[in-house]
Amino acid sequence: MNETINSILNRRSNRSYLPAPVEQEKFDLILQCGVFSPTAKGVQPWHFTVVKNRKLLDKISAINKKEVFENGNTAARMSAMTEEYDNFRGAPMAIILSGMTDEKYGEADCANACTNMSVAAHSLGLGSCYIASFRPAFSTVEGKELIKALGIPDGYTPYFALALGYINESPQERTARREGIINYID
């Protein structure tokens, strides 16, 4: 099996990381894989924010926890009740992907970039977790300040994040893939 197929089939979302930092050359390659992702009409409507400041990631999680607890659905509120609630799963860093708010396919293009980067991370021996659950934090008054602190340009919306780090867990058994989801038309 070739390396690309192997990385796609074996990548998992990781939820426990070692505190060791990720080397600059590795996350530079991961970012390059994001920049070279498919994009509708070649627009490239993304902005990547590399956050290596764990206190800032904790602040985003704290704001999100409060927002989700007050306004989230039942499952989200239950998750927010735990002390260890952390949108970034304890990773030493994350890449936040923001898209041009007015670009029709901006969110989908950011999703493409996040997927490419998660596969690239796996191929480099890193763990990652593709995250959208942090978004409620940015709808708050404090969240608007965070957007400025993160250097996200005006006219962009934070859509996804990719937590990155060295894995501190054994991969769980992969969930069985659903059957009957493919049909062929000749």
Image (cartoon, rainbow, N blue to C red):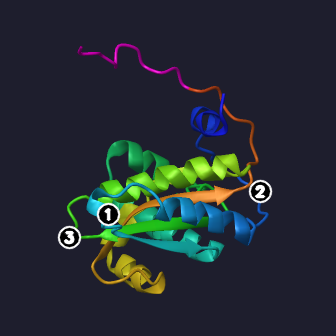
Quarter of the N terminus within the rendering: top right
3D distance between C-alphas at marks 3 and 2:
38 Å
Judge from the rendering whether residue 74 lies leftward or rightward of residue 35; answer left or right: left
Closest to the observer: 11 or 186? 186
Which numbered mark, 2 or 1, is in the foreground of this view? 1
Q: At 64% across and 74% down in the image, what residue appears? A: 52
Between label 3 and label 1, give the one nearer the viewer: 1
CA separation in Å, label 3 and label 1: 15 Å
Find residue 73 and report its horizontal and vertical position in percent: 32, 47
Closer to the camera in the image, 103 or 81: 103
Please say if the residues under marks 3 and 2 sit with CB atoms less than 8 Å apart: no
Dot 2 falls on a residue whose secondary structure is loop
Residue 185 on the magenta span: yes
Magenta part mainly helix, strand or loop?
loop
User: Which segment is the magenta one?
Assistant: 175-186
Q: Judge whether 56 appears above or below 40 on screen.
A: below
Residue 101 visible (yes or no): yes
| Amino acid identity at mark 1 | Gly
Relative image position of residue 120 (x, y in whole percent):
61, 51
Instruction: Give the amino acid type for the residue marked by disc 2 in the picture.
Output: Leu
Dot label at residue 18: 2
Residue highlighted by disc 1: 42
Q: Is residue 24 left or right of residue 151?
A: right
